[in-house]
């Protein structure tokens, strides 16, 4: 499986919903807290949660559901 990153922050309700959606379909991701990096914070601050594929750098922004994630991955 390709590498996936979920950009978000702690205490983000939408990020929790995104994680639950991904868990529900068995998709493992690396979680990155944008609050720990000024560049990421500037880039993603109003867009989180964002799912990114590491093989081609495509991004899927919130809102997304299980069907959208599956289309994004395949």
Image (cartoon, rainbow, N blue to C red):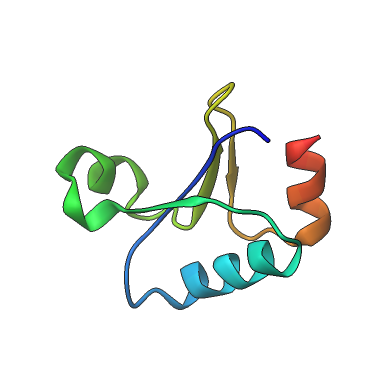
Residue shown at 18%/53% (left/top)? 36
Q: Position of residue 60 (x, y in %)?
A: 61, 44
- Vertically, is 40 above or below 46? above
- Vertically, is 71 above or below 8? above
Residue 8 sits in which quadrant? bottom left
Residue shown at 74%/62% (left/top)? 65
Residue 19 sits in which quadrant? bottom right
Q: Position of residue 29 (x, y in %)?
A: 53, 51
- The image shows a total of numbered marks equal to 0
Q: Position of residue 7 (x, y in %)?
A: 42, 51
Residue shown at 72%/69% (left/top)? 24
Q: Position of residue 64 (x, y in %)?
A: 69, 58
**Quarter of the figure with the C terminus:** top right
Residue 58 sits in which quadrant? top right
Q: Which residue, as the protein is rendered here, is positioned at the far top?
A: 56
In the image, is 16 to the left or to the right of 37?
A: right
**Quarter of the figure with the N terminus:** top right
Residue shown at 38%/55% (left/top)? 46
């Amino acid at each position: 499986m390709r590498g996936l990153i979920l950009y978000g922050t702690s205490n983000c309700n939408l990020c929790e919903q995104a994680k639950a959606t991904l868990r529900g379909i068995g998709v493992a991701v690396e979680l990155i807290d944008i609050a720990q990096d000024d560049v990421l914070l500037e880039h993603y601050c109003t867009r989180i949660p964002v799912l990114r594929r590491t093989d081609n750098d495509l991004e899927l922004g919130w809102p997304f559901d299980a069907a959208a994630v599956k289309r994004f991955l395949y």
